[in-house]
Structures are given as C-alpha cells and as structure tokens.
Image (cartoon, rainbow, N blue to C red):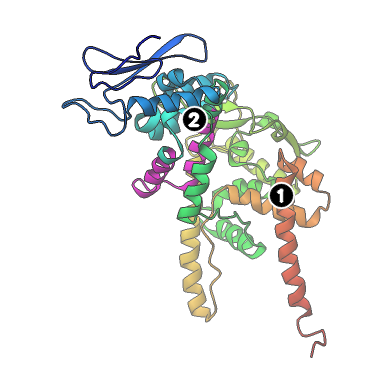
Amino acid sequence: MSEKRKDKRGRILKDGESQRPDGRYCFKYKSISGKYAYVYAWRLTPTDTTPNGKRDDLCLRDKEKQISEDLQNGIDGQKSKATTLNELFEKSLSMKDLKKSSESNYRYFYNHFVRDKIGGMSVKDIDFEVLYSFYNDLVNKRNIQIRTIEAINSFLKASFKLAKRKKLINEIPTTEALEELKSNHKFIKTKKHALTPEETEAFINFVRDNETFSRWLPLFTCLLGTGCRINELLSLTINDVDFKSKQISINHTFSYYSNEKGKCELHITTPKTATSCRMIPMFSEVEQAIRTELNKQAEHGLNVAEVDGYTGFIFTNTRRNVHRQSSIYLLIERICKAYNEQETQQAIKENRAPLILPKFSAHTFRHTFASRYAELESNAKTVQEVLGHADIATTMNIYSEISAQKKHYSFEQIEGKMKLA
C-alpha cells in the first residue's frame, strides 16, 4: 500500500492535491473537455494563514468544492474564469442581425456604463450580488433612470444567455438583480397618457394664433392626424404621399447612430418593426397641411437635404434642411411654457382655473391620435394596422384606458338621476 502524500506541515493531501517547492498548493483535475486543468492557492484550508506578501481569496479546498459543483452542473469553470463579460458582449452582438442604429445604441450604453466597471470581470464572478451592486451604484451614484438600466439589463441578459449555452455559468443573474433593484427603490413605471381633447384644442389654437409658432402648425396637424412616430413623419418625402388615393406610405424612418469616429449621424433605415411599414389614409386636414408645407417650399426654396439617397423631404427648416427630432422636442417645451404663462395670466383676469398643459413629448401626439381614433373605431385590428403596432396587446391597452375613462364619464352623466336612497 503506497504512502499518502503529505504537505510540509505533515497533513495528508487528497487525490489530485500537491504542494510545490515554493509552498503553493495545487489541485489537478479533468475539465469538461477531458483535458487536465490546475488551480493553485497559498492555503490548503480556510483556517490556514496566508504567507506574508501573498494573497488568496479562496483556499485550495474551497476551490476544489467549486470545481466539483461546476463539473456536476456541466460548467467549464476554468474557461468561464478566463472569459470576460466584454468578450461575451462582443460575441453576442456579432450573432444578432441588428440595424446599424441598434448596434450603435447598444455599444454606446455598454461602453458608457458597463465596459470599464464590470466588463473586464470573469463572467463566472458576476453573480446576483455583483450585478445588483452595479445597478444600485448606477441609481445612487450616477442618478441613472430605471429605463436606462432596463436597456442595459436587456443586452447583458443576451450575454449571460450565451455564457450559459457555452456551459460557462449555470444561472443567469439579470432578471433577479433587476427585480430586486425595482423592489428596493420602489420603481413604478409611469404610464404614458394622451392629451385630453381640451388640452389638444388649447395647444393647437395657441400654435395657430401665435406669430412665433404658427409656422409649425402643419407639422403638429400631421402628427395628430396620422399617429406617425416623429422620425417617420420627419423623413416623409413627396414620393410617400399619394394625393390621388389620399394615402401616406410609411416605408422608412430617420435614425441616428455613431460613425467609426464616434460622431452621431443622420441616416435612413427601415421602420421600427415589419408591421410599421404601412399605408395611412389622409384626413383632409392632413392633406391640406402637407400641401401648405409644399407651397412654402415652392415659395422659399426646396428642401436641399439628401440622406442616404433620399431627397424631396416634406418638412423643412429655415435652412431648407430636415428637422431633427431633438429640435421638435425642444420646440414643444417652448410652446407649452409660453402657453402656460399666457393661460395663467388670462385665467387670473377672468377669475377661473387655468387649463395648464402637462409636460409631454412629440410621441404624446401618437398616443393622442391612438386614443381619439380608438374611441371612434371599434375594430382593434384596423387601429393596430394604422398605428403599425407589432403586438395587438399594445393596441388593446389603448382600448382599456379609454374604457376606464368612458366608465367614469358615464357615471358623471347619470349622477343624481338614479334613486339610490
């Protein structure tokens, strides 16, 4: 019977364990691939003292335990230790068939928030606690909004899914970490609401009658009368409008993404989803608004912009170029501020409560169109097609909100007319 191997302190070593001349302990084992692999530690057990100047996070026996668990779960521990989150992100991104704009957005968020923080870590070391701590720091130290963290979480989830398929990890930490963050910070997703008919009328009347803002009336009329996303509308060309059949073709949209030098550029891309390619009938007010824009160009000069081969854009700024989405958002903010100031003063003079416009964006006009249209059109499929919703559930959410509003309205109308007591 062969004598058991011992360390320098006379302790019996297990199969696969050994101690090197410099004092380090070694464990030899077969990895998932069948090849021999080695792990090292300065301590054999948790109670051992680490030699001066040496550092150990785990003793050899604890590392052996981890290896045993990984092998039982079919995880290649050595490979996962050597694979960083940065590597997995790049790999998962290369496997997706993404638009350039989407890829640019993913890279921006990853490089800006993740790469230098936890990107260089081994994927095996990024567990729930590490990921939750990372998200928590984004909220507490950088004041990052939950929607941004949700976006980060979505592409990190793809990276961890790839790691699991490659047998590098056993569990994906993203869902649990995000749910815990939302729970602890009491995050509640605010629901986007449409403008009321009174708010819509107040906004439009103010724009129409204001000397500074009246030139923007055709654009707002088209937003309210088509339900287009802002970049779908801004990218419309004369070739997309059929005055004879009174239809607008939505077949492309503006998109912004960074070039190789990191500079943000405007491009033409396909709409958000396949269902976003659609034909929208024109109301007479929308047709007149588009004709007004074209007449302005005939008088002051045609739009000279060319974006990825597209020309003849309908909506043009004073420099005969296309509008930028950010400019429209700032414009709406300016209009609402000017209106609210004027309305407040007028209400004081007339001794009444003012009708104050809430803070909203260009996308609110799409919600407003959807609500008003759904109130009059009972066929949800028709509404879905006009709006270009990929999921009918998105359309049905509009109906449920309208239903709740109508329910309260109906009770207001019969208040006092039913004998209850």
Stretch of the chain drawn in magenta: 131-158
Distance between mark 2 and mark 1 Cα atoms: 39 Å
Taking depth in this image into account, of 316 and 261 the one nearest to the observer is 261
Q: Which image quadrant: the C terminus? A: bottom right
Q: Position of residue 62 (x, y in %)?
A: 38, 29
Rendered residue at 39%/40% (across/down) = 134
Rendered residue at 71%/55% (across/down) = 371
Q: Position of residue 23 (x, y in %)?
A: 23, 17
* Location of mark 2 (residue): 106
Q: Callout 1, which amino acid?
A: Glu
* Location of mark 1 (residue): 285
| Residue 134 belongs to the span the image colors magenta | yes
Q: Position of residue 136 (x, y in %)?
A: 40, 46
Q: Is residue 143 visible?
A: yes
Q: Quadrant of residue 311?
A: top right
Q: Is residue 269 left or right of residue 407?
A: left
Q: Position of residue 273 (x, y in %)?
A: 67, 32
| Residue 140 position (above or below residue 129) | below
Q: Does dot 2 land on a helix, a strand or a loop?
A: helix
* Residue situated furthest front in the rendering: 1
Rendered residue at 75%/52% (across/down) = 373
| Residue 100 position (above or below residue 320) | above
| Residue 258 belongs to the span the image colors magenta | no
Q: Does dot 1 land on a helix, a strand or a loop?
A: helix
Figure disc tally: 2
* Residue situated furthest left in the rendering: 52
| Crowding near the residue tagged with mark 2, few <14, some 14–19, many ≥20 C-alpha atoms within 10 Å | some
Q: Is residue 236 left or right of residue 155?
A: right
Taking depth in this image into account, of 24 and 244 the one nearest to the observer is 24
